[in-house]
Image (cartoon, rainbow, N blue to C red):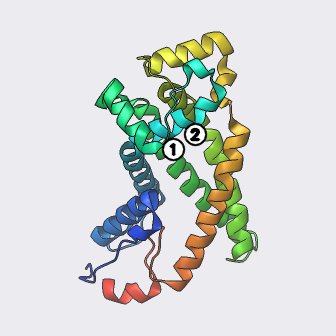
Amino acid sequence: MSSDKKIKEPFWLGGAAACMAVCFNKLRGYTGKKLSVTQNIACAGVAGGVAGLVGNPAEVVLVRMCADGAKAPAQQFGYSHAFDALARVYGEEGMRAFWKGLAPNIARSALMNVSQIATYASAKQYLLGIGFGDDIKTHSISSLAAGTMATTICAPADVLKSRMQANAGKEGLSQVLATGLREEGPRFLMRGWTPAWLRLTPHTVLTFVFMEKLRLLTSIDWLGTVRSTEKEALR
């Protein structure tokens, strides 16, 4: 029988983390038991997809402002700041421009969460099985593997998303993909892997290490497992 005890969702952990916390804790509340691997992965995918959907307008602005430096002056958007970019995108291109690259962005966000969670959990389980302790060393190695896997899996969607969002044209996903394959070959889908790894992996390591520490210090169990203090209430 499930408990009436309310589980607090830690929205202060950030956008994607908050979505994952809600998914994990709500589903655990319905089942009253430890979530399966499939349920954990599904929650991570849904949380990532929702975060990608909500954050797409900001992604459009971010990609364009970052890409301006590599363009000729005549081709630059010339946004002075983020709010100027938001106003000009809406005024010059309409609301639909904020949703450019939405499909690959949702796919990227979902794949990132799924690959990070699945790889981290698998790597940690393997290390614990061969004698490693449940400590910062194990957490760091596991999260390093998770960051590397996530970078590799998300690279194609990231490239397609960025190319769609970086221009004001009307090219769709299939057009961008076909043009890239024709002009650059399949390897274009992995362009920018190294800087993406340098950005994502430290973030992944810090995220999982801090989450493991928070798990020990608080009642938050981000993977949705039932803690010993809650088992009695669930009976």
Q: Amino acid at mark 1?
A: Leu
Q: Count how many numbered circles sit on residues in the image.
A: 2
Q: Is 173 on the left or on the right of 210, as rendered?
A: left
Give the Cα separation between the discs numbered 1 and 2.
6 Å
Q: Is residue 30 above or below residue 2?
A: above
From the top left corner, tell me how far across and down residue 179 is, in percent. 56, 12
Q: Position of residue 1 (x, y in %)?
A: 25, 79
Determine the secondary structure under disc 2.
Answer: helix
Of residue 95 and residue 103, the one placed in the foreground of this image is: 95
- Snapshot quadrant of residue 163: top right
Closer to the camera in the image, 80 or 229 = 80
Report helix, strand or loop for mark 1: helix
- Determine which of the numbered discs, if any, sits on residue 111 in the image: 1
The residue positioned 60% from the left and 72% from the top of the image is 210
Q: Residue 39 at what x, y percent from top left? A: 41, 57
Three-letter amino acid code at the position of disc 2: Cys
Q: Residue at x 23, y 82 (%)?
A: 4
Horizontal placement of 144 versus 67: left or right? right
In the rendered structure, find residue 154 and report the number of the disc placed on it.
2
* Callouts 1 and 2 close, C-beta under 8 Å: yes
In the foreground, 53 or 121: 53
